[in-house]
Amino acid sequence: MKIIGLRIEKYIDKEISGHNCDFEYKDAEFEKHIICGVLEDNRKVEIELSHSEGECGSGWRTASWGNIKVTEVKKFNGYTFIPKEILTIEDIEPNFDGDISNNVFSVDCDGGDNYYPLGGYYVNMELFKETIRNKKLRPVWIFKGKSNSGKSFLASKLNDLDVYETDSNEALPESIVASVIVLGNKHEFSLEDVKSKIFGEVEIQVVEFV
């Protein structure tokens, strides 16, 4: 398998703290690395690496898992890092699930203990160089414009992104973690009202519908 590039996607998930059945979950920014590669038979795959957090089986301490998802694609969904030199690893078939280790990345699903999981993943970023397309901050898109201009319709087609519609509630939530925000006209929230509620440090792109 030849590695063509990778991208890093930032997203919001739940971070856990505590012990002995007394845990606290809160929103936090996570990253996942998606490696784009071509198998020996010329099929394209995207290898998504991520980690998740929760509680161990006894409820005594926090737990973490390393996750891998291999998907065959017709074309890559973009990459923001490219190899410094030719990178090859053994083929990884779509739907592979389990621990893996090679010269580019490794995944440890549960640290060898499924009752007290302590898993994660690692990518050797020294093998890659950043392109100008890489974003340092999590991108958030705000759709705004007149009613019946297609804001909600387009947002509903974005299957891989969380969407929040301001028309869904009379008041804005304390924290908006969605990647796409549809600024409706029902409650007359301003653009600045919405921006002030977005979680974390982000790069905001305002998309105007006319």
Image (cartoon, helix red, strand yellow):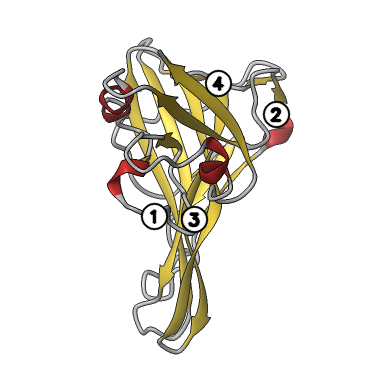
Q: Nearer the viewer, mark 1 or mark 4?
A: 1
Give the percent coordinates (x, y) of residue 72.
32, 23
Residue type at mark 3: give it: Ser
Residue, disc 3: 175
Residue, disc 2: 127
Please report the residue visible at 43 percent of the width from the left and 43 percent of the height from the top: 178
Residue type at mark 2: give it: Leu
Q: CA distance from mark 2 to mark 4?
A: 14 Å
Q: CA distance from mark 1 to mark 4?
A: 38 Å
Q: Earlier in the sequence, mark 2 or mark 3?
A: 2
Q: Nearer the viewer, mark 1 or mark 2?
A: 1
Q: How many marks?
A: 4
Give the percent coordinates (x, y) of residue 110.
43, 62
Closer to the camera in the image, 183 or 36: 183
Q: Earlier in the sequence, mark 1 or mark 4?
A: 4
Q: CA distance from mark 1 to mark 3?
A: 11 Å
Q: CA distance from mark 2 to mark 3?
A: 37 Å
Can the viewer see residue 1 in this picture? no
Residue type at mark 1: give it: Ala
